[in-house]
Amino acid sequence: MDDELAISVRGLRKAYGDNVAVADVDLDVRRGEVFALLGPNGAGKTTTVEILEGYRQRDAGEVSVLGSDPARPDPDWRSRLGIVLQGTGEFDELTVAEVVRHFAGFYPDADDPDKVIERVGLADKAAARTHTLSGGQKRRLDVALGIIGRPELLFLDEPTTGFDPEARREFWELIRDLAAAGTTIVLTTHYLDEAEALADRVGVIAGGRLVEVAPPSRLGNRQEALATVSWRTPDGTLETAASATPTALVAELAARFGGEVPGLTVTRPTLEDVYLRMIGH
Ligand SMILES: Nc1ncnc2c1ncn2[C@@H]1O[C@H](COP(=O)(O)OP(=O)(O)OP(=O)(O)O)[C@@H](O)[C@H]1O
């Protein structure tokens, strides 16, 4: 096992009856990396992640997570993981501070509950009973419970669903801070901007197969794709051209217009464009 790897997966396979949910997945995640798993509903993300977390059994393949096989983990293995599930929900009558303190008790080297509550932006809700929290605030509490044990490896399942834009930005900052402090992070998300903002690499999974793994900027050869240049002619018509040399085209347009080119835009395929192509749209 390579010590540089937080996760190493070879030939992972899982079927539910005849339904093959995960087929021949090979995947490495380096220590300190932020890795995003993207894929449409039913692609196999949760199945894969729950196998890595030790919550589901695999049918075949080799899996190592922080040096252990999740199917036969070392005794202290689980305390080195942080898992942010979609909603804990069982502690409705307890306050935020009580729940976070309660979870801190499960870990040998837990972080300071007040500090963690502050970090996830719930300081002014510390004394509130959890059933009074909004959806976004509940997700922040989920995140607090995921990081209270100072995990080496943090799993986040669609972490910002229900967040308002400001809360998402704050959450992204938190993830960047955790990553900067050396935490390895694996997240699933349906938000491509989130993957682009946070991930060192993304893996696209479709139909149980890992279609591609690459940094967001390089996925689907995005960098080599033709640029789309648009501008308006003097009579206001929108013109569009696909170009491998957009700088030359813009220079030519600038010369033609004798200065500013009306309505000029230059775009490359977005992560969403290449992602949708990859999953067959
Ligand atoms: N416990 C289960 N029993 C039977 N089939 C399951 C079970 N869990 C998942 N599946 C099936 O396995 C496939 C992959 O599901 P999975 O939940 O891993 O996808 P996902 O990528 O996480 O989807 P989503 O984005 O909707 O959360 C789907 O066809 C799903 O119906």
Image (cartoon, rainbow, N blue to C red):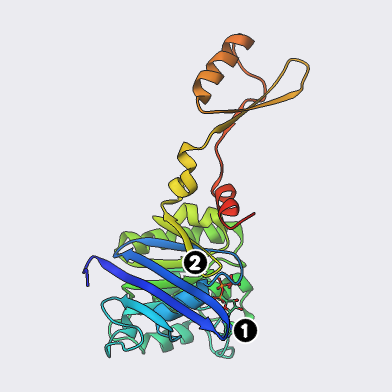
Q: Which residue is mark 2?
A: 209
- Find numbered disc 2 in the image and state the secondary structure of the residue it sits on: strand
Rendered residue at 28%/76% (across/down): 66
Rendered residue at 46%/75% (across/down): 48
Neighbour class for label 1 at 10 Å: few (<14), some, many (≥20)? some
Q: Nearer the viewer, residue 224 or 265?
A: 224
- Give the residue at the far front of this rendering: 18
In what quadrant of the picture does the N terminus appear? bottom left
Q: Amino acid at mark 2?
A: Arg
Rendered residue at 47%/72% (across/down): 23
Q: Amino acid at mark 1?
A: His
**Ligand 1 contact, mark 2 (Cβ < 8 Å):** no
Q: Earlier in the sequence, mark 2 or mark 1?
A: 1
- Find numbered disc 1 in the image and state the secondary structure of the residue it sits on: helix
Give above or below for 55 relative to 37.
below
Residue 150 found in image quarter: bottom left
Image coords of residue 249 (percent x, y): 55, 19
Q: Nearer the viewer, residue 253 or 165?
A: 253
Q: CA distance from mark 2 to mark 1?
A: 39 Å
What label sits on residue 4 in the rendered view?
none
Image coords of residue 70 (percent x, y): 35, 83
Q: Which residue is mark 1?
A: 131
Pointer 2 with pointer 1, Cβ within 8 A = no
